[in-house]
Image (cartoon, coloured by chain):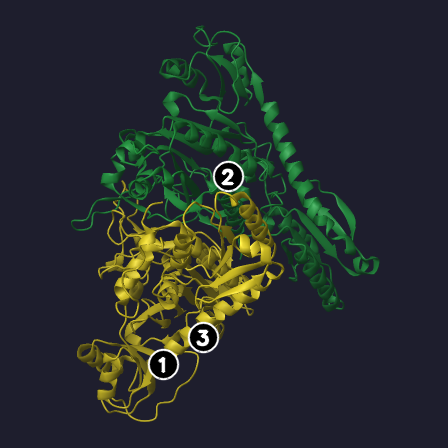
Chain colours: A green, B yellow
Amino acid sequence: MQKKSSEGLSVKKDENFSEWYTQVVEKAEITDIRYSVKGFVVIRPWGAMIIENMYSLYEKALQEKKHKPTFFPTLIPEKNFKKEAGHVKGFTPQVFWLEKIKSEDKLALRPTSETSMYQMYSLWIRSHRDLPLKLYQRANVFRYETKATRPLIRAREFYWIEAHDCFETQKQAEAQVQDDIKTTEEIMHQQFGIPFLPLKRPEWDKFAGAVYTIGSDALMPDGKIIQQPSTHFLGQNFSKTFDIKFKDKQGKEEYVWQTCYGPAISRILASVIATHGDDKGLIMPFCISPVQIIIIPIFSNDNKNKILKEAEKIKENIELIGLKTEINASEKRPGEKYYEWELKGVPFRLEIGEKEIKEKKLTLFTRDTGKKEKIEINKLSNLKKFGEDFDKRLKTKADNFMQDKIINCKTKQELKNALENKKIARINFCSIEKQGEKCAEHIEKEMNAEVRGVLANKQEKPTGNCIICGEKANEVVYIGKSY
Amino acid sequence: MQKKSSEGLSVKKDENFSEWYTQVVEKAEITDIRYSVKGFVVIRPWGAMIIENMYSLYEKALQEKKHKPTFFPTLIPEKNFKKEAGHVKGFTPQVFWLEKIKSEDKLALRPTSETSMYQMYSLWIRSHRDLPLKLYQRANVFRYETKATRPLIRAREFYWIEAHDCFETQKQAEAQVQDDIKTTEEIMHQQFGIPFLPLKRPEWDKFAGAVYTIGSDALMPDGKIIQQPSTHFLGQNFSKTFDIKFKDKQGKEEYVWQTCYGPAISRILASVIATHGDDKGLIMPFCISPVQIIIIPIFSNDNKNKILKEAEKIKENIELIGLKTEINASEKRPGEKYYEWELKGVPFRLEIGEKEIKEKKLTLFTRDTGKKEKIEINKLSNLKKFGEDFDKRLKTKADNFMQDKIINCKTKQELKNALENKKIARINFCSIEKQGEKCAEHIEKEMNAEVRGVLANKQEKPTGNCIICGEKANEVVYIGKSY
């Protein structure tokens, strides 16, 4: 395909992150924004293969935690959609509606699937023996965003997983919320290398229909927050409106307790790109790169066949240890090939030419460190370990970046300074219940920043008064600017 | 989950296939038709896991044949949709339209994606070096069906793969069409056990916008034909309307030659269910069953822990050889469990109780033959081979069924009889070009059957005159009743 990927990036990530991002998703052929519907982008093969790998790891984790896959229809009838009052209020402005067909119900494209799934849950659940019910679907969802869209970050169609669980007791449901945070930690942080703060959102910022919401706040290189998977404790709000009841062990009828969890795979990919990439292009975690090791044969017309044959053997050996590899055998110059695969973020490059064959040692280039070294042909199995180290380095670097960004602020002026310096501020705050909204509005108005919430998996005790209103602080909150 | 699967099927497949199918998809928990939008069903976990396995095998085959994955938007602007005249005529009655939003374009839910993908192809393709371009997407598509819908067979939303390829020459494109037929053969027939006739459709029955269409006609147990993957030679019809051009080696600008191929995974599952199932329920091919071997521990309160521990060991050993297995450890009676897993079509059941542990031999039940035999605990690796044999038996049985259904007919009366006996008739026929349509209409009116086309991968020579009009026969066609 054409798309002049060889042109490279014309800006530095540190100097203009926004433009860097726009260029890298295009030039590394992740997305194409030229699709003819506003807010909708095409995911190109390199992006699609990464997304498939991310889905695969995420779904495996959910299945190991006893979730089962399903597929629900994309269309939701208006009457379902309107059942839960908070939910409809929150989502209605964002809904794409279908033209009415004859006397059939008016239909919405799902912006999220509570109201499509829960009517079925009420048919499937009868007894405590049917619980817990833990289902998920891999799905594309639609939201009419009015803010400016950005590829993968904010789009009108995106690719996610939504898990919807039902339990006998509140305690079990709240334990699931904590387990969802752990899943985000295990996959998004430990595997994809994206650190996050699991923050319980203030009352005024929770999911439409939830009792409470925990968002995973990750950081972009420009200091802005991007919300990643959120998990919601729904209490019995939806089970009461959708009539999802079970008979408990004593034969008494009760409403189920519910949770839902929504990792948006395409949006997590935005964080992966933004967090790990550098001025040469993407740096893909080893665990999700569609090609983990690219083999570049260095040949002339005289020795092409011989070199390609050796490269083929190397490829087979690498595949035998279960790694994904490819030979780039085109007629382009090696330098041009190096350049393209670095742009695409492939973790390792193996160069093989006459000299390498004679010495029985290949040249190994590592994308994140830029280091070139020799690797013996009979020690290629080390690549597995190298790959693990690669991912650990990406993660550590991202962790350090995030840690440096969080600043304790004791006064309003410190808070202002921190936000101006693109930091996340940690402050004593009056309350994330309704009565704290005024202080949050003040921050939003004065500093164009948001109260994101309190840590959800760890209790942090405030040590003074709210630095906004001066009243007793009940919480330690995190504040930042967001996407 | 409740859904009284233990109730079993109340009809025999031979006696009332239609009712058998309705019951089996519900009771084996493949789909639930009680979703509140007409023509849309929910795919339940057992169905979703099978579909995932089918996708996985199909996508692997396409990738091995150099196709790459992509994701295109679900929404298509009206102006794209209307570009190719034949296409818009064929699909417009089936389109779901969105309510217009402000001044934005009117949008359709994709019924198929030519008109969303090809505008991008015209941006991506510049030179012969960009060809061939072979992309596919895993997608859900929407068609407003006015005929009665049936779960998986005909629905308003279905799950498919669509591959869209571009080539420099007509010859390459037509070779791709033949290769698509081979892919259907390798996956749908060789792996899923569904035989089919690859039939080049008559001129009046081709895909809207194609030069010609090859459908894969499979047979349902009631003798009706169901169309499975079709592949289309598009010629330059779309490349001319979407302006997809390339510079050839001489620098001359040419339009690309195109093909597309659409295996509908959810519909293929309908054939798998219908073809292999029996009066006890589903019979799932070993290669796609979410559980290949179900382990049923037989215990009392006294020895439960001991038996479960042994069962766990068996499970680990089976997983080590790469097979999918599960222990059903619930408190239900073994007989009830046997029943449920037979209904779900799991190929093998291993029973383990005191006696089995003592003898170091497990009881192995095989779903399709109903045979019970002993298998030594240290010979469980044989299960892999047993699984292959299992799939071969399913395939052979389906092949024989299909062969018996195809009847050569030399007169109109023979044709009538064959169709009344639910056979596929093979006859001499005047023409599948425009001039043959009259004879086809005659057959449709008199016998309520369709001329499905001529074999696409093998030349069959007619040996007389058209048995309808008496003119010279140019073709050997296949005729049947269809879904």
Residue B113 location (% of width, % of height): 38, 57
Q: Residue at coordinates 46% horizontally, 74% vertically from top-left?
A: B178
Q: Residue furthest bottom?
A: B464
Residue A174 location (% of width, % of height): 43, 28
| Nearest-to-viewer mark from 1 and 2 | 1
Q: Secondary structure at mark 2?
A: helix
Instruction: State the mark number for residue B404.
Output: 1
Q: Residue furthest right?
A: A359
Subunit bearing disc 3: B
In screen coordinates, is A117 left or right of B323? Answer: left
Residue A205 location (% of width, % of height): 39, 24
Separation of residues labelled 1 and 2 (CA atoms): 54 Å
Subunit bearing disc 2: A
Q: Which amino acid type is shown beneath numbered disc 3?
A: Thr
Q: Which amino acid type is shown beneath numbered disc 2?
A: Ile
Q: Residue at coordinates 42% horizontally, 65% vertically from top-left?
A: B261
Q: Which amino acid type is shown beneath numbered disc 1?
A: Asp
Question: In the rendered picture of this protein, how many numbered marks are placed on residues?
Answer: 3
1 and 3 marks in contact (CB < 8 Å): no
Subunit bearing disc 1: B
> Which residue lies under the disc numbered 3?
B396
Residue A342 location (% of width, % of height): 64, 47
Q: Residue at coordinates 33% horizontally, 75% vertically from top-left?
A: B201
> Which residue lies under the disc numbered 2?
A268
Q: Quadrant of the rendered structure where residue B400 is?
A: bottom left
